[in-house]
Image (tube, grey):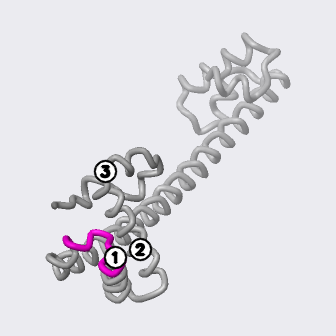
């Protein structure tokens, strides 16, 4: 009997019908569950050793474990270490992504805030009667960009700053 722990994740078998149809898979799922249980309570090496001994004693994968005990223990330790390592990496990458997203959000918020401020200023300057050239000279933005903004504001006097920002 061969087991492929990388191909089939025993923890994924919540439907009993699949496990009932394949006794070896059911026993493997039980073995994995016991490894996880014992490694929560003991160091990894000891937990795997306890799980193997317990399974042999209770007839779970007994023949296979008796014949391949050393290899099963070393592979279980390797696989379990790899699984823990992958979980750690996943958490680390999630945290990195969270930080990147947070920074992007802050930058976007600042950019949006600056645009809304500029729009409000230009709306006020237009209401005060400043000419387009005077408004352009008061800003540090490219001429074409400000002219476009002035045009949107003048053509849509009913729009608020947020609506204008979306159109601009």
Magenta stretch: dominant SS? helix
Q: Position of residue 142 (x, y in %)?
A: 53, 31
Checking the image for residue 22, the label placed there is 3
Viewer-closest of 12 and 1:
1
Whole-angstrom CA distance, mark 3 to mark 1, is 17 Å
- Residue shown at the point (35%, 89%) measured from the top left: 46
Task: Identify the residue at the far top of this view.
Answer: 155
Task: Kindly indicate whether the residue at mark 1 contacts the one at mark 2 (C-beta within 8 angstroms).
Answer: yes
Find numbered disc 2 in the image and state the secondary structure of the residue it sits on: helix
What residue is shown at x 61% (from left), y 26% (from top)? 146
**Discs 2/1, front:** 1
Q: Total of numbered circles in the picture? A: 3
Residue 168 in the image: state x and y as whole percent.
Answer: 61, 23
Residue at 71% from the left image edge and 31% from the top image edge = 119
Q: Which of marks 1 and 2 precedes in the sequence?
A: 2
Q: Quadrant of the N terminus?
A: bottom left
Residue neighbourhood size for the residue with mark 3, other residues' Cα within 10 Å, grouped as few (<14), some (14–19), many (≥20): few
Q: Magenta includes 103?
A: no
User: Depth-wise, is mark 3 or mark 2 nearer the camera?
Assistant: 3
Please give the residue where the numbered disc 1 appears in the rendered image: 55
> Which residue is disc 2 drawn over?
34
């Amino acid at each position: 009997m061969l087991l492929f722990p990388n191909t089939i994740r025993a923890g994924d078998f919540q439907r009993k019908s699949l496990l009932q149809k394949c006794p070896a898979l059911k026993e493997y799922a039980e073995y994995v569950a016991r490894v996880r249980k014992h490694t929560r309570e003991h160091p990894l090496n000891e937990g795997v050793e306890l799980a193997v001994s317990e399974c042999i004693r209770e007839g779970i994968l007994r023949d296979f474990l008796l014949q391949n005990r050393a290899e099963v223990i070393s592979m279980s330790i390797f696989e379990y270490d790899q699984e823990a390592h992958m979980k750690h990496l996943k958490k680390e990458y999630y945290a990195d992504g969270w930080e990147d997203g947070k920074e992007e959000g802050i930058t976007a918020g600042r950019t949006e805030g600056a645009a809304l401020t500029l729009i409000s200023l230009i709306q006020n300057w237009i209401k005060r009667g400043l000419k387009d050239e005077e408004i352009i000279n008061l800003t540090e933005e490219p001429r074409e960009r400000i002219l476009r903004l002035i045009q949107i504001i003048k053509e849509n006097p009913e729009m608020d700053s947020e609506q204008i920002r979306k159109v601009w």
